Image (cartoon, grey):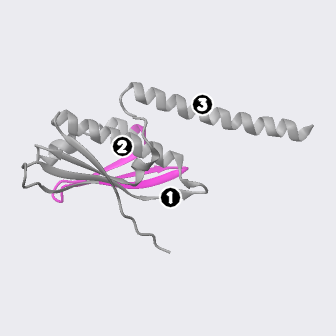
Amino acid sequence: MDWIIALLFVAGVFILIWYLKRRKATELGTKGRYVERDNGFFKQGHFFFTKTDDFTAIAGAIDRADLLEEKISFEPNIEQRQIVFHNKISFGTFGARLRFLRQRKEDGLYMYLFQVETWRNGQYGITRQDLFGANVLLTLIEKAFLGIDSETEIQRAAAEYKSKF
């Protein structure tokens, strides 16, 4: 009998956690800060092709208040034309970078790359907190680019990673 109560308690905790995460995702989705994506986005390079080469404007368009609320640090280096992001919360931590790559010769658009570069694997793979935080971050970056240039092209490609033992 005690094991049934314990089993029901554990099931209740999991249902509560699932509900709270769904509620937060729905709330952020209505605010335009979260987009439902396949989890594969985490291991993709996100290329932005835009008319602007003003990296200061791009960095300024990223909503710092939303980053702060999600506990994501914002470390711009305007000289190197890159921004480093870190998410440091109790159950997950990831590092990502947005950087200028080059100007395309064929159309003159400027090419930027956003990529999650480091993360901590949980017992069952990439932690849910890292997936959630990286999704919010990617959504904010997409909004920043589209806010500066509504004709920004976004392309995704599988990224190559090396593991260290």
Query: Which disc number belongs to residue 137?
Result: 2
Q: Residue at x 34, y 38 (%)?
A: 139
Q: Can residue 84 be seen at all in this image of the molecule?
A: no
Q: Secondary structure at mark 2?
A: helix
**Which is nearer the N-term, disc 1 or disc 2?**
1
Q: Residue at x 35, y 59 (%)?
A: 159
Give amino acid for label 1: Arg
C-alpha separation, residue under disc 1 versus residue under disc 2: 17 Å
Residue 128 appears left or right of 50: right
Q: Quadrant of the N terminus?
A: top right
Q: Can residue 137 be seen at all in this image of the molecule?
A: yes
Give amino acid for label 2: Leu
Q: Looking at the picture, how far across and down is residue 6, in whole percent?
A: 82, 39
Give amino acid for label 3: Tyr
Q: Nearer the viewer, residue 32 or 108?
A: 108
- Magenta residues span 69-97
